[in-house]
């Protein structure tokens, strides 16, 4: 009787526990475990809009490859169907578009990891493995010889196969291969920093994963500096130069990586693990000061600055990516990356949000799966984790385990995989290309590994048990589009298929795990632009006439007139004519301060979008606004002239490229973007040069000129043309009877100069060296090489060839027209003045001082 009563009691208790599991596996329990979920919108709406193809699928294999949203591929297909992208090794317009877009993507990658082109370079590869192979082949391994220390190739045993595989190359080169167990790095560290050894310069390489792809354990990023400084093992035991390869492929799929905190020398990544698309594309981020040590033997197309086919002569490309990207890169895939970044940030906001969301799902699943028991109170799962999911700073969104039956025996992972597939649940099983971690967590010795091989087990097969012992495990991993419903369905699947009923929960363990050390709260800090102190703009008393003089052989002795001043607030858009205008440190105030970029962030010019000339920007100094007007647009768009202090994250600082130069820019907001997109009929945005960014002249100029600061202009602060030169071109055009002659003003507008002068002879300005207008001195730095933009009518946006053809027939050599100028402000001053149009008088170089009409201006020398 006593036994029967006890059985009835246990049945009632176990039945109550069974009901508790259904109740526990709920969103209410999740919110008790973790407070961060989603990205400010209903995740169900996100799934319906972006991932409708899942259609009930529970996808839990994001560590292998995450999923791409619908809008990403839609935007990408629109991009490549609308634009012509050519091979970037050519120089035609379609090739330049590709080149500029690819360079923009490189900047965006570096910005994503909080670094700059001055610190790192991006080398595109076919994937993370190819990036690792590049380092292995290029690292200057030094063989160990008698009396001479050789290089060490060191790696954590918890590394991916592709990292460990580097030893296949180093072993043949006499390099010492040293596997390092994770606990050794700190346990065998030295208390004091090892001093610089100037005698031993032997290069060593230490490789470790930022996050284990097996267990999701995040290794301290501080290891990077510790190894480089030779404080940590094995660097502290071996003299020489230590370099660090940080395998970031697993970490960056769901977590941010700040290279300012961990300046690793080499960082390989795969993009499909972050975005899901494109596949077959990775990159190696290389520290610039380290890149020179990488040596290449093979050189493919595009990597050589010069070589001879008849003898062994080869000069490698100076640019780091060009040096290592053999052949033509997968440029359409690189272009897709821009849409990948756009979509990811639009949906989630930032990588920190993804980290918080995915960690919460993984932690919840870990807590419940760890506490799940059979009816006899035996645990259901054997968990393989370093900690207990206390914090997203130490644990990623990966959960690794094996299921056990009610007798405590392991259930083969192949059986779990097959049943999960029947429930449309996608998981990953095996050893996940990480034999070291697999051996460590499953307790498989080297001898057992060899016996398993003899029994027929190889990596990637379904032989999950040998002599009753597991050869691998089950891994579930989460992505930014994963939901609580995914967790709930997976846990219900385990309970239904693998738990002896009634299902029970170890309440004590569950409560203990929930009460574990609370994760440190992480917050997002928005870095905003700080408006610098207002630069003084000195107002020079306006004179209606300002004089200068041409000196030197063959100089013209008549009167000159500055007839027009044009400001181009937005690069490649219409001119804004003024009669007097302030001059600032970068040229005419607000000249080329903004530019329009396409959906990929690449600068649009009239060569790519002729209709830009129909946009007529005007600068209103009184209202502090940039006003945009265009033919066919009823409304006028207003943009603030100055960047406001404390602007929000909707106006991020980004990297762009102008005439080969990298520039930092700030987005002007969705209003201007929408207005421009409507007018131009393609996605585009308005950006402006960041006020904290200084762009200098090209290095080809002398030091004095190179110190001049530029806006978003191509070459110099100003472009000046001579009406006499224009009239000669007009004469040539008129003589071409088959061509329709344009009037002089139409031709002037096509050459888009800042200053138009009159009174001299045609092309004589090309022999000038400097000039002074008012009290501002200008230096002539060279001629402007003209492009096909002069064939675009600035009034209609239509294309004609007459100006360029006529100019080409008139000139020999390079087709040039107009001269570039830079100004010289008073020493130690950022003040300038106001330029005014008017006639320009001259003095003779031998004239006395009293003959100089100082009230009218200055002179040109």
Image (cartoon, rainbow, N blue to C red):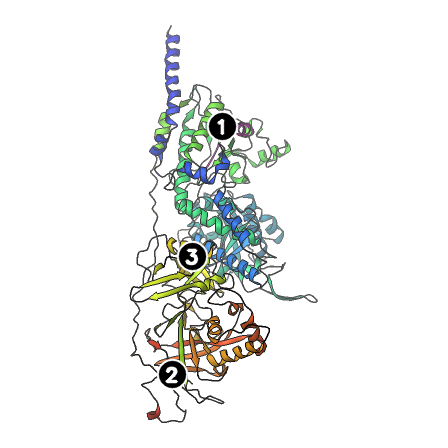
User: In the image, 347: left or right of 271?
Assistant: left
Q: Secondary structure at mark 1?
A: strand
Q: CA distance from mark 1 to mark 2?
A: 91 Å
Residue denoted by label 1 = 403
Q: Is residue 663 above or below residue 345?
A: below
Q: Which mark is residue 839?
A: 2
Q: Secondary structure at mark 2?
A: strand
Q: Marks 1 and 2: CB-CB under 8 Å? A: no
* Residue 266, x across and y down, in percent: 50, 54
Q: Marks 1 and 3: CB-CB under 8 Å? A: no
Rendering quarter of residue 449: top right
Q: CA distance from mark 3 to mark 2?
A: 39 Å
Q: Is residue 79 above or below residue 802?
A: above
Q: Nearer the viewer, residue 625 or 468?
A: 625
Q: Is any atom of residue 665 visible in this view?
A: yes
Residue denoted by label 3 = 676
Q: Assign the C terminus to one quadrant of the image.
A: bottom left
Q: Is residue 825 above or below residue 366?
A: below
Q: Which residues are the magenta region? A: 397-423
Q: Residue at x 40, y 33 (%)?
A: 364
Q: Assign the N terminus to one quadrant of the image.
A: top left
């Amino acid at each position: 009787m006593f036994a029967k009563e006890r059985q009835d009691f246990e049945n009632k208790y176990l039945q109550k526990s069974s009901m508790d599991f259904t109740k526990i596996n709920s969103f209410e329990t999740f919110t008790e475990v973790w407070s961060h979920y989603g990205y400010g919108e209903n995740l169900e709406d996100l799934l319906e809009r972006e991932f409708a193809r899942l259609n009930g699928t529970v996808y839990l294999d994001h560590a292998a490859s995450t999923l791409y949203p619908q809008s990403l591929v839609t935007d990408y297909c629109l991009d490549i169907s609308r634009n012509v992208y050519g091979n970037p090794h050519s120089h035609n317009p379609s090739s330049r578009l590709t080149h500029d877009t690819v360079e923009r993507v490189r900047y965006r990658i570096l910005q994503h990891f909080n670094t700059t082109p001055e610190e790192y370079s991006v080398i595109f590869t076919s994937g993370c493995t190819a990036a690792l192979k590049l380092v292995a082949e290029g690292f200057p391994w030094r063989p160990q010889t008698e009396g001479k220390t050789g290089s060490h190739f060191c790696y954590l045993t918890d590394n991916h196969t592709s990292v460990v595989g580097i030893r296949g190359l180093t072993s043949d080169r006499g390099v010492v291969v040293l596997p390092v167990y994770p606990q050794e790095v700190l346990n065998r560290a030295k208390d004091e920093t090892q001093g610089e050894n100037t005698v031993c310069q032997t290069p060593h390489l230490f490789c470790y994963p930022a996050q284990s792809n097996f267990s999701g354990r995040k290794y301290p990023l501080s290891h990077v500096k510790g190894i480089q400084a030779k404080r940590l093992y094995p660097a502290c035991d071996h003299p020489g130069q230590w370099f660090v390869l940080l395998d970031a492929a697993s970490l960056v799929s769901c977590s941010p990586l700040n290279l300012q905190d961990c300046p690793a020398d080499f960082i390989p990544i795969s993009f499909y693990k972050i975005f899901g698309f494109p596949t077959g594309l990775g990159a190696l981020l290389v520290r610039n000061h380290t890149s020179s040590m990488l040596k290449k033997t093979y050189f493919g197309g595009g990597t050589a600055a010069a070589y001879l086919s008849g003898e062994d002569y080869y000069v490698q490309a100076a640019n780091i990516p060009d040096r290592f990207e053999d052949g033509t890169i997968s440029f359409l895939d690189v272009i897709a990356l821009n849409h990948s970044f756009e979509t990811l940030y639009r949906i989630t906001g930032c990588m920190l949000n993804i980290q918080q969301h995915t960690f919460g799902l993984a932690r919840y699943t870990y807590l419940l799966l760890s506490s799940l028991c059979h009816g006899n109170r035996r645990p259901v799962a054997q968990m393989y984790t370093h900690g207990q999911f206390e914090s997203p700073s130490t644990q990623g969104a990966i959960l690794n385990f094996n299921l056990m039956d009610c007798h405590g025996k392991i259930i083969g992972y192949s059986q779990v995989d097959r049943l999960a597939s029947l429930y449309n649940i996608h998981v990953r099983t095996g050893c996940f290309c990480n034999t070291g971690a697999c051996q460590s967590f499953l307790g498989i010795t080297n001898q057992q590994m060899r016996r398993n091989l003899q029994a027929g087990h190889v990596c990637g097969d379904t032989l999950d048990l040998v002599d009753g012992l597991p050869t691998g495990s089950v891994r579930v991993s989460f992505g930014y589009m994963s939901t609580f419903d995914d967790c709930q369905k997976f846990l219900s699947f385990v309970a239904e298929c693998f738990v002896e009923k009634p299902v029970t929960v170890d309440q004590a363990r569950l409560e203990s795990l929930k009460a574990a050390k609370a994760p440190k709260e992480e917050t997002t800090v928005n870095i905003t632009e700080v408006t610098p102190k207002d630069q003084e703009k000195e107002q020079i008393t306006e004179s209606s006439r300002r004089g200068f003089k041409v000196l030197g052989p063959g100089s013209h002795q008549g009167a000159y007139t500055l007839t027009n001043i044009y400001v181009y607030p937005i690069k490649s858009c219409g001119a804004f004519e003024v009669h007097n205008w302030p001059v600032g440190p970068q040229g005419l105030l607000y000249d080329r301060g903004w530019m329009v970029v396409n959906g990929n962030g690449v600068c649009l010019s009239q060569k790519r979008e002729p209709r830009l000339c129909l946009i007529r920007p005007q600068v209103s100094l009184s209202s502090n606004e940039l006003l945009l007007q265009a033919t066919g647009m009823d409304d006028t768009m207003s943009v603030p002239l100055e960047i406001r202090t404390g602007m929000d994250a909707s106006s991020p600082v980004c990297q762009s490229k102008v005439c080969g130069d990298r520039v930092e820019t700030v987005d002007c907001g969705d209003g201007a973007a929408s207005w421009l997109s409507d007018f131009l009929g393609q996605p585009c945005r308005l950006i402006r040069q960041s006020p904290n960014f200084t762009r200098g002249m090209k290095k080809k100029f002398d030091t004095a000129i190179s110190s001049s600061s530029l806006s978003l202009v191509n070459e110099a602060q100003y472009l000046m043309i001579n009406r006499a030169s224009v009239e000669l071109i007009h004469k040539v055009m008129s003589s071409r009877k088959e061509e329709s002659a344009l009037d002089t003003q139409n031709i002037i507008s096509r050459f888009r100069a800042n200053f138009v002068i009159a009174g001299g002879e045609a092309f004589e300005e090309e022999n000038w060296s400097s000039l002074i207008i008012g009290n501002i001195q200008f230096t002539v730095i060279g001629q402007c090489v003209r492009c096909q933009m002069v064939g675009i009518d600035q009034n209609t946006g239509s294309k004609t060839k007459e100006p360029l053809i006529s100019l080409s027939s008139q000139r020999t050599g390079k087709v040039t027209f107009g001269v570039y100028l830079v100004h010289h402000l008073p020493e130690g001053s950022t003040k300038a003045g106001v330029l005014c149009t008017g006639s320009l008088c001259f003095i003779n170089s031998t004239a006395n001082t009293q003959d100089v009409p100082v009230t009218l201006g200055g002179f040109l020398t």
